[in-house]
Amino acid sequence: MSKLVAPHGDLPRYHQISNILTERIELGRYAIGDLLPTEQDLCAEFDVSRYTIREALRRLTEAGLVRRRQGSGSQVVANKAPANFVHSMRSLSELFQYASDTVFKTTAIELLVPEPEVRPYLGETADEPWLYVEGVRLEADGRTPIAFSRVFINREFEGIAPDIPGVGGTIFRLIEQRYGVTVEDVEQEIRAEPMGKYAAKLLGSSTRIWAVRVIRRYFGEDGKILQISVNYHPADRFSYSMHLRREGAKGWV
């Protein structure tokens, strides 16, 4: 039986298992053309339910590493995921993990009054200066761009500015650690819009490719807006995965 070990203990088991299987594929233990062990065998190896294994295999399929066929199992079709970023999360812990698995390269930090486009998201203090951070989020290798990000931080927390360049995780995690506040809620809005020239240049993309714009608003315990982030992903490299369940249902298996 394999022991599940994750860099962060709050990773769901299906996520841990998909990471282990991905590593095996990359190392050649499962070569291109090979079939992965059956769901039954994987359930026995990792001591988890069939549902958990199917979730893990779903992640491998979305990453382009395996192809699943009814009645014939899961076949390895690539030993490295193509440059298509799949964004999947169900909780703040997975949002933390997403940032921990990426690198943020800062291109600008300054105090400014937000432009009219984002003011509706900032509440009562929209007309006041906010700490503005701009940069590109890259995959862990530091080479492949994922998103162009514009972050507006409540000026109350501007003391984190010197620590932002090279931050290893999320900026809001830095706020929590420095000021002892807690992010309790995150609101998210996703829409498609034309890719701007500046963002396209930083992302190595084209203005002919549309952008998936993801806006997140981070709220503290008292409902105060701690920060908002506006993220632009090239539509041809990005997909968003969401898993819903009925209210009142039992917890995840």
Image (cartoon, rainbow, N blue to C red):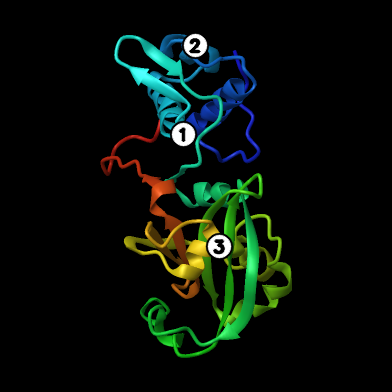
Q: Is residue 142 left or right of residue 203?
A: right
Three-letter amino acid code at disc 2?
Asp
Badge 1: few (under 14), some or many (20 or more) residues near its Cα, within 10 Å?
A: some
Depth check, front residue: 114 or 76: 76
Q: Quadrant of residue 168?
A: bottom right
| Circle 3 or circle 2, nearest the eye | 3
Is residue 69 positioned above or below 108 on the image?
A: above
Three-letter amino acid code at disc 1?
Ala
| Circle 1 or circle 3, nearest the eye | 3
Separation of marks 3 and 2 at Cα, in angstroms:
38 Å
Three-letter amino acid code at disc 3?
Leu
Write down the residue under mark 3. Answer: 202
Separation of marks 2 and 1 at Cα, in angstroms:
17 Å
Tell me where residue 210 appears, x and y as whole percent. Answer: 36, 58
Question: Quick one: SS at disc 1?
Answer: loop
In what quadrant of the picture does the C terminus appear?
Answer: top left
Question: Which residue is found at the position 53% from the left and 26% from the top?
Answer: 17
Q: Which mark is residue 225?
A: none
Write down the residue under mark 1. Answer: 63
Give whichever of discs 1 and 3 has the lower sequence position: 1
Q: Is residue 42 left or right of residue 141?
A: left
Write down the residue under mark 2. Answer: 34
Depth check, front residue: 200 or 101: 200
Q: Is residue 221 visible?
A: no
Tell me where residue 13 appears, x and y as whole percent. Answer: 51, 30
Question: Quick one: SS at disc 3?
Answer: helix
